[in-house]
Amino acid sequence: MTHGVGERMHRWATDLFPICRSITGDGVRETLGFLKKILPGLEVHEVPSGTQAFDWTVPDEWNIRGAYIEDEAGRRVVDFADNNLHVVGYSVAVDEWMTLAELQPHLHSLPDQPGAIPYVTSYYQKRWGFCLSDSQRAKLADGRYHVVIDSTLAPGSLSYGEVILRGTEEKEILLSTYVCHPSLANNELSGPVVTTALADWLQNVPNRRFTYRILFIPETIGSIVYLSRNLTAMKSNTIAGFVVTCVGDERAYSFLRSRSGNTLADRTAKLVMSHHAPDHIEYSFMERGSDERQYCSPGVDLPVVSIMRTRYNSYPEYHTSLDDLSLITPSGLEGAYDAIRKCIELLEHNHIYQATTLCEPQLGKRGLYPTLSTRGSGLGARAMTNMLAYADGTRDLVDIASVIGISGEEAIETADRLVAAELLAIV
């Protein structure tokens, strides 16, 4: 593991946690502004409300300054200032007195998780509402309540961030994460902070082979808008992509395949995860839930997968106030960072190889094989002899490593030694 990167990511998440994000608005801009201080090359784009993107339209921009429910004695029984999940996302403004019976249809809670505040949104239908714990809701007494949501929903723009890191080749690797949820740690902030750390590492990698397209977008509408503007170039150049989400806890590792299930991204992720986290859970595309839905959709067909810790919708704190900073850890974040970084490093070194000799080469005279033959003496060179046996000019390094049962790191090292000895050639 890379010393200290986990702690850095957790500090970033702690700083970003209080910001009220949504699919549009000042919270997204504030988040992107924070990330731009770490990644000066991050370019922020604004797409006007009303812009058509395939079957979707960019909605009006939403901003909120405050909200509360106050009883007749002036006590605030629910206050947005205490937790920004207390208001249904995209709630229109309201300032009314009403009875508890009139208020109840606008309240959202979770009877099966009485201590949790649910995360609820209504982006494309105008309404207002409050979210609160079921235990809070049960304490509301009959009477009249003053309900205030100080928000605006008006023409504005959708904001997203983009970093393009040029390589020696035009072919691209995509990293995509989202910046549209309020104070949720694993489901929201783990993705942007891990992606930022990967981008920070990549921008300092000398002689990058591939170009990297790194996106910080609002989920769903953001990826649809981005694809509507960049699809031609992405279809031509993308060789692999990763949606980075739910990458902060320590409970599990997960891998979600692309729609086709056999792209270079799938093969690379499967090989890396088989060694990085052998007990990981593998999900099919039928169990998708994030922006891979758009990147892998028919006609788009990008080779995009997800490597996660505990997958979205698979842990009890998901989309509730319990998904807080205690759920993600420096170690959890760093484990996911390492897994995706290993995928990138393997892709950077992935070539189709051809053995340069007929029959087995004599490794001993090149210092690659023991010159004294004893039982088991050749086992240390088994990775080299196996790689040579499968380097027939049709298999890439990912395929060879998968067949002969070695990790991506060992495959890179072995191939480099054989190329240096002129026993392997890149096709």
Image (spheres, rainbow, N blue to C red):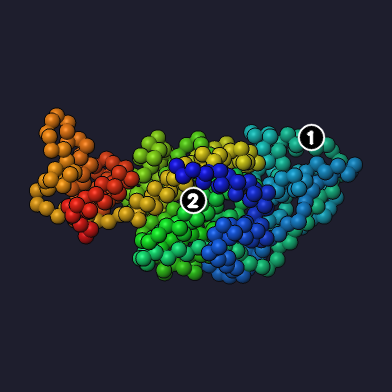
Earlier residue among tags 1 and 2: 1
Q: Residue 277, position in %: x, y?
A: 40, 38
Task: Name the residue located 46 percent from the left edge and 59 percent from the top edge.
Answer: 203
Q: Using residue 402 as the reference point, say whether residue 76 is left or right of it.
A: right
Q: Residues within 10 Å of mark 2 (few under 14, many from 20)?
A: many
Identify the residue position indicated by label 2 in the image: 244
Please, what secondary structure does the residue beneath circle 1 have? loop
Distance from Cα at disc 1 to Cα at disc 2: 39 Å
Q: Using residue 128 as the reference point, say whether residue 7 is left or right of it.
A: left
Please, what secondary structure does the residue beneath circle 2 have? loop
Task: Name the residue located 48 percent from the left edge and 56 percent from the top edge.
Answer: 199
Task: Name the residue located 76 percent from the left edge and 48 percent from the top edge.
Answer: 81
Residue 261 in the image: above or below residue 153 = above
Amino acid type shown at disc 1: Lys
Q: Quadrant of residue 33?
A: bottom right
Amino acid type shown at disc 2: Val
Q: Residue 180, position in %: x, y?
A: 60, 54
Identify the residue position indicated by label 1 in the image: 139
Nearest to the eye among marks 1 and 2: give it: 2
Query: Extreme left residue here?
Result: 359
Q: Quadrant of the C terminus?
A: bottom left
Q: Residue 325, position in %: x, y?
A: 62, 41
Q: Residues within 10 Å of mark 1 (few under 14, many from 20)?
A: few
User: Which of 424 and 79 lies nearest the eye of the viewer?
Assistant: 424
Task: Name the residue located 71 percent from the left edge and 59 percent from the top edge.
Answer: 63
Q: Using residue 358 as the reference point, say whether residue 121 is left or right of it.
A: right
Q: Using residue 48 as the reference point, say whether residue 195 is left or right of it.
A: left
